[in-house]
Amino acid sequence: MLQPRCLPGYSPKEAGTLNCDERSDIYSFGRTCHVLRHGQFPAEGACRDALDALLLHCCQEERNQRFSSMQAVMKELVRLCEG
C-alpha cells in the first residue's frame, strides 16, 4: 500500500517522509501563513497576488521546487514589501 506523500496541513517531515531538510519547515511556514491569511489550505492555482505566489512557492510538494532556505524566503518577502 502506498503512503501519501504529504498529509494536509503537515510538512513532509511531520508526515513521516524521509530525507527531510530545511525545506520541510519552509513548506510548513507557507501553509501556515496561507491558512492564517485565507482560512484554508492552499489550492492549486489559487494565486491572488504576489504574496500568494510566494506562499504557494513555499508549499510545493516537491522540495526541490521550494525555496532552498528561509533566508531566500525572507529576501523575497522584503522585496515584496519594498514594492
Image (cartoon, rainbow, N blue to C red):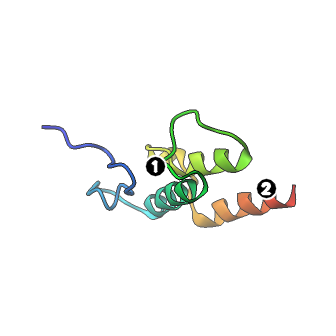
Where is mark 2, residue-wise? 80
Percent position (x, y) of residue 3?
Answer: 21, 43
Q: Quadrant of residue 53?
A: top right
Query: Secondary structure beneath disc 1?
Result: helix
Query: What is the crowding at mark 1: few (fewer than 14 residues within 10 Å), some, or many (at least 20)?
Result: some
Residue placed at 58% from the left, 51% from the top? Answer: 38
Percent position (x, y) of residue 46?
Answer: 59, 36
Residue placed at 48% from the left, 56% from the top? Answer: 27
Front of the two marks 1 and 2: 2
Residue placed at 42% from the left, 62% from the top? Answer: 21
Determine contact: label 1, label 2, CB under 8 Å: no
State how far apart marks 1 and 2 are (Cα).
Answer: 23 Å
Residue placed at 58% from the left, 33% from the top? Answer: 45
In-front residue for pair 72/42: 42
Query: Secondary structure beneath disc 2?
Result: helix
Q: Is 62 placed left or right of 1 in the picture? A: right
Q: Is 34 placed left or right of 12 in the picture? A: right
Amino acid carrying mark 2 in the image: Leu
Where is mark 1, residue-wise? 63
